[in-house]
């Protein structure tokens, strides 16, 4: 099988080119076409000789994301894509427009192994990893379609990014390369359900990306009910890893907390959460849970959301209730792919 040219960094591309018997300066030109101009074919590389283009196309390919479905929110302009991959699998990406520019939410896997009960991405289980090149393709395809430059990235789509560790780090390396898209590392967030050893490893790489942790519960009893990963790594172990991340990188952790009516949204839960997070440099994002058709959880009421936030703030923990974007287009993880699986078309 041909290799994905988008997944190569400059050094690797250079050695491939030299190995193929072409001068090294060609690597710089090719890298520019692939990573800066985001082309999808060798024919677009107009300053590359035919012989080299032909040799390249024998060895390498572009694993593009083809737009299968595109939904545009009438409320806030959020765009959701269902992309088809080279092997007929599907992934979703969402582009949101903010005051500071465009942000893309990228998927890191086809399906997911983690099995969180509130999450549509868990439906149907895990299919396969995405390569670094495929994750780049999500960004490139959206940029091309919208004709905009995307300058923020959140790894919060389908999949558990820390369960696809090397590909995700390679993707970040390529996306932040100054000879490519040159995205600022400060504009990248990665969300994890809490794979503890990988949090330590990520901290030690000292990349400076923002870590979001999907906490969703104040104690092990509630968390283990909805997040199987909690049976492997307890909340205490997780928070210890978060403190290590914070101390090693100096970056504030962001905790995601999906508020589910009657499950994790009581005053007592808020107080317990505040007690656990005390002393951690963090921010809590309260997210009214999205009703997923296949699940029967309900959002907490507005009043509950405000009360929960107030209790956290009284204890000195900053919290925001997240604005919902794209609610008219089912813009949260996995919803579109899940409905595609269901209809089987
Ligand atoms: N696997 C990673 C990233 C993907 S999920 C993680 O777990 O963090 C992105 C975020 O959406 C996570 O915080 C996840 O818990 C949350 N999420 C999933 N389903 C949701 C739902 N129905 N309502 C609100 N948030 C949800």
Image (spheres, helix red, strand yellow):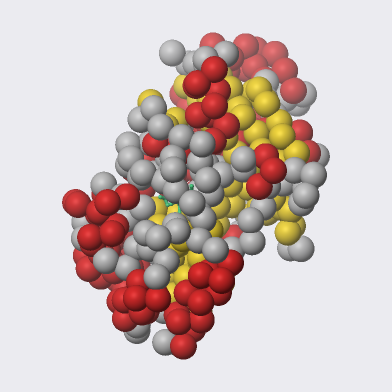
Q: Quadrant of the N terminus?
A: top left
Please tell me in which quadrant of the rendered image residue 320 appears. bottom right
Residue 280 visible to the viewer: no
Above or below 209: residue 127: above
x, y percentage for residue 2? 48, 16
x, y percentage for residue 90? 53, 25
The answer to which of 97 and 271 lies nearer the viewer is 271
Q: Quadrant of the C terminus?
A: top right
x, y percentage for residue 100? 74, 63
Above or below 340: residue 193: below
Q: Residue at x 39, y 27 (%)?
A: 124
Q: Is residue 1 left or right of residue 179?
A: left
Residue 110 visible to the viewer: yes
Q: Residue at x 40, y 76 (%)?
A: 267
Above or below 28: residue 183: below
The answer to which of 16 and 297 lies nearer the viewer is 297
Q: Residue at x 44, y 57 (%)?
A: 260
Please tell me in which quadrant of the rendered image residue 263 appears. bottom left
């Amino acid at each position: 099988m041909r290799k994905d040219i988008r997944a190569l960094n400059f050094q690797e591309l250079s050695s491939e080119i030299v190995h193929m018997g072409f001068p090294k300066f060609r690597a710089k030109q090719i890298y520019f076409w692939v990573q800066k101009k985001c082309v999808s074919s060798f024919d677009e590389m107009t300053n590359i000789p035919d012989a080299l283009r032909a040799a390249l196309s024998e060895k390498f390919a572009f694993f593009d994301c083809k737009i299968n479905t595109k939904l545009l929110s009438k409320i806030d302009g959020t765009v959701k894509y269902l992309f088809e991959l080279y092997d007929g699998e599907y992934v979703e990406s969402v582009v949101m427009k903010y005051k500071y520019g465009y942000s893309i939410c990228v998927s890191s896997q086809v399906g997911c192994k983690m099995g969180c009960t509130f999450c549509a991405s868990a439906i149907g289980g895990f299919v396969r990893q995405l390569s670094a090149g495929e994750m780049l393709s999500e960004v490139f395809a959206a940029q091309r379609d919208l004709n905009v430059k995307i300058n923020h990235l959140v790894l919060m789509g389908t999949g558990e990014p820390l369960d696809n560790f090397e590909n995700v780090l390679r993707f970040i390396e390529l996306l932040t390369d100054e000879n490519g898209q040159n995205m600022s590392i400060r504009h990248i967030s990665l969300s994890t359900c809490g794979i503890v050893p990988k949090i330590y490893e990520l901290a030690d790489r000292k990349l400076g990306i923002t870590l979001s942790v999907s906490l969703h519960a104040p104690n092990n009893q509630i968390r283990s009910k909805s997040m199987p990963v909690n049976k492997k790594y307890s909340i205490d172990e997780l928070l210890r890893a978060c403190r290590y991340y914070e101390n090693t990188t100096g970056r504030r952790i962001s905790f995601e907390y999906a508020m589910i009516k009657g499950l994790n949204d009581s005053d007592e839960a808020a107080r317990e959460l505040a007690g656990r997070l005390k002393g951690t440099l963090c921010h809590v994002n309260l997210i009214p849970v999205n009703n997923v058709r296949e699940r029967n959880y309900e959002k907490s009421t507005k009043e509950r959301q405000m009360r929960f936030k107030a209790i956290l703030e009284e204890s000195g923990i900053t919290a925001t209730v997240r604005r919902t974007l794209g609610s008219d287009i089912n813009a949260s993880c996995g919803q579109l792919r899940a409905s595609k699986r269901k209809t089987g078309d």
